[in-house]
Amino acid sequence: MKRALISVSDKTGIVELAKRLIELGIEIISTGGTAKKLIEAEVPVINISDVTGFPECLDGRVKTLHPNIHAGLLAVRNNEAHMEQLKDLKVETIDIVIVNLYPFKQTILKKDVTRENAIENIDIGGPTMLRSAAKNYQDVAVIVDPMDYDRVLNELDDKGTISLETKFYLCSKVFEHTAHYDTLIADYMKQERKDTTLPKTMSLTYEKVQDMRYGENPHQQAAFYREVRNTTGTLADAKQLHGKALSFNNINDTNGALELLKEFSEPTVVASKHANPCGVGSGKSIYEAYVRAYKGDPVSIFGGIVVANGEIDEATAREINKIFVEIVVAPSYEKAALDILMQKKNIRVLQLENIKEKQPSTAYDLKKVNGGLLVQTVDALLLSEEPLKVVTKRQPTEKEMKDLLFAWKVVKYAKSNGIAIGVNQQSIGIGPGQVNRIWACRQAVDHAKEHLGEACLQGSALASDAFFPFADCVEEAAKAGVSCIIQPGGSIRDHLSIEACDKYDIAMVFTGMRHFKH
């Protein structure tokens, strides 16, 4: 190990590393701002131009793109022809490369960043050196992460060299790093073009937020990763104020509750269990909304998740604390409310300031299957562009239409087959994830009767996430006292449901679009 090339954007620990390398008898080649910092710290440095015989030019765009650099990196040391050529060309080998890249991510995350500024922060020479060094990992140690400085220095101190195992580990980190970097650039360009098409090839990149104790079950490993951009209003952007770390299931379940919450602009609370809504309420205040959500299913909310789109006040916190909930998420909390919630050790309290902000329509929804990945754009629409179509003899009243739209929002986020029943801006029965629709309908009706009594169903609104293939759900709704139904329509047997509604004086509205959720 005779020579190291150092060119870093993130200068964390670089002076200390360089000094240690010098003590070990290793020469240092450096560029631009890195060379300046090392010289200021009295670290002896060979300027890159003295190696290339060519000055840095084009505002620093060209510094290391030179055969004297890349031949020194790519020459295979046990290849006699390679080494003879280096001798003839008067090129010296480079044994260690310490490079990290222009801050493209930090640049595009700045508010109102210009395209010109973003493009200027696309590194060219850095990735090229990294790839050259990593390709020749048997002979060159290449460090892209400051967290690896100590590992390399410890091996040099102990053995005077760097093991092949460590070199290969460092090599793999390089290609992870450059793949992440290039994917960020490609994603930025796609969004700049406002391209909503699904690409021919897909590269996705995420950054780890935390390792988890386990996944869905204790025998599964798990971690939480976040997107680099478009995280505002998502759980990845939340600040945890109290409680132990979120689990895999916590995050998955809370995400579903948050997505439903974003459909509402008025004060609303969503209670969720196992990624399905179990109680939803809207009102004039968050307190009123919570009471409605709780009463919608006071059994299932136990051990569930509560999300609110307004500040949690003291009165609401006292109500929440009457039962055990896993998680509370809100944009803010009164101090007294936070003090009350934090009295319970096992509750997780999260603050998500931009809780109402939705994901852009260009965002992807991903589902992993064995051997592949299913990709679709997010289900960003609530209703189609076509107006709602009343298909029955009776028109819904203004109140019924308000209840229908409320129930439609709820059923959009219940697993298919799903039925949601609501009245007075409160869910009173939700039947999610059944293998046939009549079961979902009966489940929703039974839950309403169990928790609120049969009277609550009189004049209620029922929503179905997909069409009725038979009239059985209408029959069930009529027996319960439902007065209006909203569903996509589109079955070849639509007439059976319409005729049944007319028979029982039920108003039925078609949306012209479905919301399957699998």
Image (cartoon, rainbow, N blue to C red):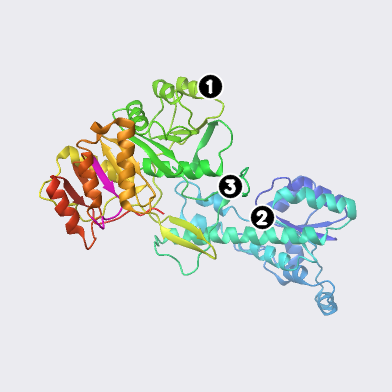
Which secondary structure class fits the magenta region best? loop
Q: Amino acid at mark 1?
A: Gln
Going from N to C along the chain, the mark reached first, 2 or 1, is: 2
x then y, percent, for residue 441: 30, 46
**SS assignment at label 3:** loop
x then y, percent, for residue 33: 67, 52
Residue that appears at 80% across and 66% down: 139
Q: Amino acid at mark 2?
A: Asn
Q: Is residue 460 left or right of residue 208?
A: left
Occupied quadrant, residue 31: bottom right
Question: In the drawing, what numbered circle is on residue 100?
Answer: 2
Residue that appears at 31% across and 44% down: 442
Q: Where is mark 3, residue-wise?
A: 215
Nearer to us of marks 2 and 3 is 3
The answer to whether one can see residue 117 in this image is yes
x then y, percent, for residue 275: 44, 44
Mark 2 and 1 residues: CB-CB less than 8 Å, in contact?
no
Residue that appears at 59% across and 58% down: 180
Q: Which residues are magenta?
A: 461-470
Mark 1 and 3 residues: CB-CB less than 8 Å, in contact?
no
**SS assignment at label 2:** loop
Question: In the drawing, what numbered circle is on residue 343?
Answer: 1
Going from N to C along the chain, the mark reached first, 2 or 3, is: 2
